[in-house]
Structure formats: structure tokens, C-alpha cells
Amino acid sequence: MLSFSADADMHFGLGKEASEKEISAWNIDVRPDGSGLPSTEGGNAIQGKNLYQQHCQFCHGLAGQGGAYDQLVGRLENDSFPFAEHHPPVNTIGNYWPWATTLFDYIRRAMPYTRPGSLSDDEVYSLTAYILYENKIIPEDMMLTAHNLPTIEMPSQRRFVPDNRTETQALR
């Protein structure tokens, strides 16, 4: 019978130690406070519209109104929050997403669906800007950058409470 312990120095002869270059290629997370955002020229909704039509419209419909996959655009009157209704509204970027920075992170990592991670950072800024513009959160000509993206307050941000417990406190 094999016995494993956390202290065992076991090697199975599989894989190799990751290089700094390999680690940095995967270490692309962007936090709600904006840490991790790339410092590039950025992009705006005008640039993002064409990119959206090329890469996103097939799944998310014309101007984010919904298609084969989720609707991205939609705000509720007065940014209300109909929590316990029998027919709640569809969650969209405009009525549910808490941080603009994590929208950037999600698009960068997971989109487009057929080629995730294939967009340049400036293209991701432009797509983020287009989706925020369509949700009436930013003006069409606003250039999104690492400097101003964290300052955008999303309509539903106040409904989310960060978990400020340390990892050990959360596990208790």
C-alpha cells in the first residue's frame, strides 16, 4: 500500500519546472483594483465596434443583445435590483457585472470562444470599451487604459462585497 505525506519529496518523472517566461505568459490575471492591467495605448468603443462584429457578434448578437450565447447589454430602470421576482431579468454586463477591470480580464482570457487569448491587449481594451459603451457606462470616444479602467464604477458594483478575510480565515 502506498502512503503519501505532505512532507514527502516525491518525483514522478513527469513534466519540467516552468521557466519564468512560461510563468509570465500565464500570469495575466487582472484584479478589481486594476493590478495586472497591461500598460498599452488602450482602446475605445469606436475601435471596439468593428472587433465586436468580427469576433463576438456571432455568439452574443447584434450590439450584445443576445444570440447563441449570453446577452451582454442591458440596464435596468434606475439601476434597480429586482432580487426575488418570479421572472428576474437576464444578468448582463450593465446590470450585474461588478468591476470593469474583471470584464477586461475575462475577455482577455476566454474570448473569442473559438480562439481564447488570441486578442492583443489593445483589442481587449477596445472590446471592453465597446461593451461598456453599449451598456451606457462610458462615452463612445473614451480611451480605456490601465490608468482609467479601474476608476469606472459599474452600476452593480455596490451590490458586491469583497471577501477581505485572509485565506486561513476563509477556510475555518
Image: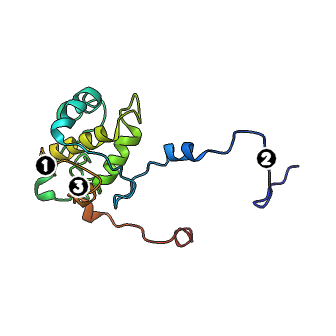
Mark 1 Cα shell of 10 Å, populated few (<14), some (14-19), many (≥20):
some
Using the image, determine if residue 158 lies above or below residue 27: below
Residue bearing the label numbered 1: 136
**Which residue of the protein is positioned furthest toward the right in this rendering?**
1
Residue in the image at 19% along x and 36% along y? 47
Q: Looking at the picture, how far across and down is residue 81, in whole percent?
A: 20, 59
Q: Which one is nearer the viewer's eye here, 114 or 24?
A: 24
Q: Give, as a three-letter code, the residue at label 1.
A: Lys
- Residues at badges 1 and 2 in contact (C-beta under 8 Å)? no
Q: Earlier in the sequence, mark 1 or mark 3?
A: 3
Q: Earlier in the sequence, mark 1 or mark 2?
A: 2
Q: Looking at the picture, how far across and down is residue 118, in whole percent?
A: 39, 32
Residue bearing the label numbered 3: 85
Front of the two marks 3 and 2: 2
Q: Tag 2, which secondary structure?
A: loop
Q: Give, as a three-letter code, the residue at label 2.
A: His
Q: Earlier in the sequence, mark 3 or mark 2?
A: 2
Q: Tag 3, which secondary structure?
A: loop
Tell me the distance, in whole angstroms, between the alpha carbons under discs 1 and 3. 24 Å
Using the image, determine if residue 159 lies above or below residue 14: below
Residue in the image at 44% along x and 48% along y? 28
Mark 2 Cα shell of 10 Å, populated few (<14), some (14-19), many (≥20):
few
Q: Which one is nearer the viewer's eye here, 146 or 117?
A: 146
Label at residue 64 = none
Q: Left or right? Give the position of 107 relative to 23.
A: left
Q: Indicate the quadrant containing the C terminus: top left, top right, bottom left or bottom right.
A: bottom right
Q: Give, as a three-letter code, the residue at label 3.
A: Glu
Q: Looking at the picture, how far across and down is residue 126, in whole percent?
A: 24, 40
Mark 3 Cα shell of 10 Å, populated few (<14), some (14-19), many (≥20):
few
Residue bearing the label numbered 2: 11
Q: Tag 1, which secondary structure?
A: loop
Tell me the distance, in whole angstroms, between the alpha carbons under discs 1 and 2. 54 Å
